[in-house]
Amino acid sequence: MAAQIIVAYKTPADPKAFDKYYFDHHVPLAWKIPGVRKYQVSRGPVVTPAGPSAFHLIATLTFDSIADIQKAFGSPEGQAAVADVQKFATGGVEMNFFEAAEV
């Protein structure tokens, strides 16, 4: 069964600078995390049924299991990616992970 981590980045102080850093630096760094099977990001505004959201970008990384996520973020590459978030996520970030199932 697959597992996913959702990384929800709140609106940063400078969205253009966030996007440049995120796609030029952070994405290549995050792809080095062991066990990443798929990496998806939101495109365009993140909205709610009621209108605008507090989030600028949402990333979904897929792994084989929760244990693989825990192992990956304990690795040097995972630790580097987590430390890197502090360099660009000026609006804050929320991270959640879970087992995923098709219904």
Image: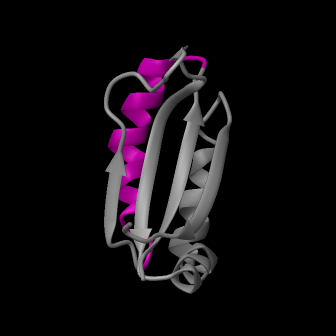
Q: Is residue 15 above or below residue 65?
A: above
Image: magenta residue range = 13-34
Main SS, magenta residues: helix
The residue positioned 42% from the left and 77% from the top of the image is 2
Q: Is residue 65 above or below residue 91?
A: below
Image quadrant where residue 96 sits: bottom right
The residue positioned 59% from the left and 47% from the top of the image is 85
* Magenta stretch: includes residue 79: no
Front residue of 101 and 37: 101
Front residue of 100 and 29: 100
Q: Position of residue 9 (x, y in %)?
A: 56, 37
Colouring chosen for the image of the structure = one colour
Q: Is residue 27 above or below residue 103?
A: above
The residue positioned 39% from the left and 46% from the top of the image is 25
Quadrant containing the C terminus is bottom left
Q: Position of residue 38 (x, y in %)?
A: 31, 65
